[in-house]
Each structure stands twice: as structure tokens, then as C-alpha cells.
């Protein structure tokens, strides 16, 4: 499902216009991004939670040459599915 299909599904399920559904989705994405940038955790009961973790610097290998390369440390977004979502998928 891509963004346009998600907007269509949101609009039909919530009885909204596509423009309102797009604004709602964009608002959710913007608010989530801002909270994660600050290091906050976002929990949606039954759906799951988003958090930021720090991935340490490490040494890797270039698969073409086998030469060692340094991979810089960075922050990564993690999502852990809630029990309700996991139950519906399985």
C-alpha cells in the first residue's frame, strides 16, 4: 500500500474527504517526526510504539573488494508492534 492508497482507505473508513485524510496523515507524519527528533517515544495502545535508538559505529566490509570500511554511528527509528496488531496479523 502506498501513500495515495492509504489516504483513500483512511477517507473511506473515516467518512472524510480525500483532502482531509491527506491533511490528517501529513499531520501525523509531521508530529511523529518532530517527537522522534526530540528523542520522545510514541505509543499507540494496541497498535505499537515508535522510538529512537543509537546504533554504534562499527567496522564493515565492502562486498566487492573485501576492504574494511568504517560505518559511522547514527540514530535509527524502531517500531515495536502492539499485541492487538500482532494478533490481527496472525
Image (tube, rainbow, N blue to C red):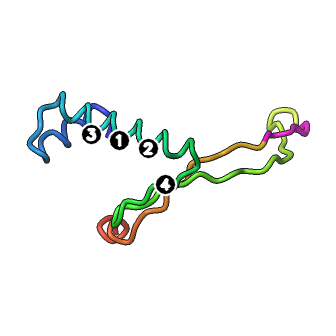
Are the residues flagged by discs 4 and 3 in contact, CB closer than 8 Å?
A: no
Q: CA distance from mark 4 to mark 3?
A: 19 Å
Are the residues flagged by discs 3 and 1 in contact, CB closer than 8 Å?
A: no
Q: Nearer the viewer, residue 89 or 14?
A: 14
Q: Residue at x 35, y 61 (%)?
A: 47
Callout 3: SS:
helix
In front: mark 3 or mark 1?
1
Residue 70 pos. (x, y %): 86, 39
Q: Residue furthest left?
A: 15
Which residue is the site of mark 4?
A: 50
Q: Residue furthest top?
A: 19
Which residue is the site of mark 1?
A: 28
Are the residues flagged by discs 1 and 4 in contact, CB closer than 8 Å?
A: no
Vertical position of residue 50 compared to residue 87: above or below: above
Please provide the residue range marked out in magenta: 66-72
Callout 4: SS:
strand
Q: CA distance from mark 3 to mark 1?
A: 13 Å
Q: Residue at x 33, y 36 (%)?
A: 27
Which residue is the site of mark 2?
A: 32
Residue 51 pos. (x, y %): 54, 54
Mark 3 neighbour class, 10 Å CA radius: few under 14, some 14 to 19, many 20 or more: some
Q: Earlier in the sequence, mark 2 or mark 4?
A: 2
Q: CA distance from mark 1 to mark 4?
A: 13 Å
Q: CA distance from mark 1 to mark 2?
A: 6 Å
Amino acid at each position: 500500500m502506498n501513500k495515495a492508497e492509504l489516504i483513500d482507505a483512511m477517507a473511506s473508513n473515516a467518512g472524510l474527504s480525500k483532502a482531509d485524510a491527506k491533511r490528517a496523515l501529513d499531520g501525523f507524519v509531521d508530529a511523529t517526526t518532530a517527537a522522534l527528533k526530540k528523542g520522545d517515544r510514541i505509543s499507540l495502545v494496541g497498535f505499537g510504539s515508535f522510538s529512537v535508538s543509537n546504533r554504534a559505529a562499527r567496522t564493515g566490509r565492502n562486498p566487492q573488494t573485501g576492504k574494511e570500511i568504517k560505518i559511522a554511528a547514527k540514530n535509527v527509528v524502531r517500531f515495536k508492534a502492539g499485541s492487538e496488531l500482532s494478533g490481527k496479523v496472525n
